[in-house]
Image (cartoon, rainbow, N blue to C red):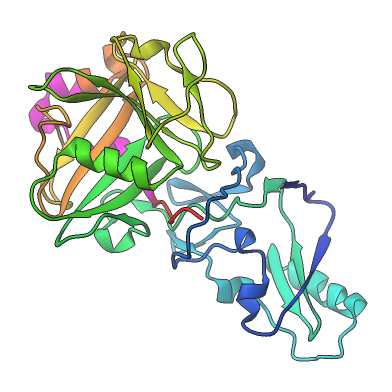
Amino acid sequence: MTKRIILSTLIALTLFACSGNLEDSIDSDLVSSSSSKKSSSSNKAVPSSSSLTMSKCGNYDYDTATHICKSGELQEISPSEIISSSSSKSSSSKNTSSSSSKEISSSSRIVSSSSSSVVVVISSSSYSSAAYAHYGTSKSVKNFTFEDIKYWVGEGDNRAMLVVQWNDKKSPGTLAWGYRWNGTKYGYDMINDIAKADKRFFHLRFWSGSYLGYAVAGIGFDVSGNAKISNGGSCQSPVDGSVNADSYDFDDWKLCAGVDERWGAGWYDAYWSYWVADDIKSKWEYSGLGASSRVLKDNSVDAWYFDLDMNDPDKSTFYRCMEEPDNCDGRNFFGAITPVNAPR
């Protein structure tokens, strides 16, 4: 259920606290934690970017409810910074609200407690209850490392990173997952395995034959896990994270409904450009192979950028880098990277 909170009105939500850790008593959807918690089958909708309270940190936009800006660097707000425990067990709800209101002047989100209740006072624009559950701390692309990854899929001694930029002006702009494996894996294996494990992430694919394998036709992210897409016919839900196209009509595939989902598909008008690096600190180059042919290496990166207009060479990373491949580094297109937290 969407919770409306108006900036001009301080709304206190009183939650009965059970014995034990205070953090466990608070709705986990309101608290962004850097540690992954147990996944559940229910995922709730994140708000559209217009409903978040955004600010600037250097050259990057960020959500003030989940991050703070210190010396130009984005930092995730930890539960200890969000939660303030009251030392007085006899405080009344009236006194607690008054105290919290005073603290609001220096912080836009305060959580205080007494022996019998927890009071959450938040000053923000409207948002859904899961607004802060899905993302970790953003960093510039050249400062982002494997240690910043929050959610890993697979097991093994090797590791790689999947990076996706929808180029849709929504925040956060670029998302990242971690992937582990042993043996031989391909770029498409990483997308497909992550889509199977993370119900928020899905893709449209086209079987190009045994030699070329699957082409990645579209990529989406929906925090509810209920996205459906269509090419003009009936709406289809992803099965194990994928929907199959039967022709190169990728540009015709659209979301059936919803405003918070991330989605991009295309081949002729729009296009998913594919950038790879065998080491995270090296140059990201445009891949000369499709994802089904690209062999992953330990510490490698596969990054996907959605070119919105293939008909305008000035707007296409694909055409720009075909003209000057030696001077083209894909990292220049992706901006800040935000790690995806484990699904709840």
Residue at the spot x=66%, y=41% of the render?
A: 51
Q: Name the one closer to the observer, 161 or 38.
A: 38
144 vs 39, left or right, is: left
266 vs 3, left or right, is: left
Specify whether residue 114 is in view. Answer: yes
The correct choice, above or below, for 135 with respect to 175 in the image is: below
Does the magenta segment cover residue 329? yes
Instruction: Tell me residue 248's x, y (percent).
Output: 28, 10
Specify whether residue 335 is in view. Answer: no
Looking at the rendering, the stretch of residues picked out in magenta corresponds to 320-338
The correct choice, above or below, for 83 with respect to 38 in the image is: below
The correct choice, above or below, for 47 with respect to 25 in the image is: above
Q: Name the one closer to the observer, 252 or 103.
A: 252
Residue furthest out toward the front:
239
Residue at the spot x=29%, y=14% of the render?
A: 267
Instruction: Tell me residue 291's x, y (percent).
Output: 17, 32
Location of residue 81 (image quadrant): bottom right
Instruction: Tell me residue 93's x, y (percent).
Output: 89, 76
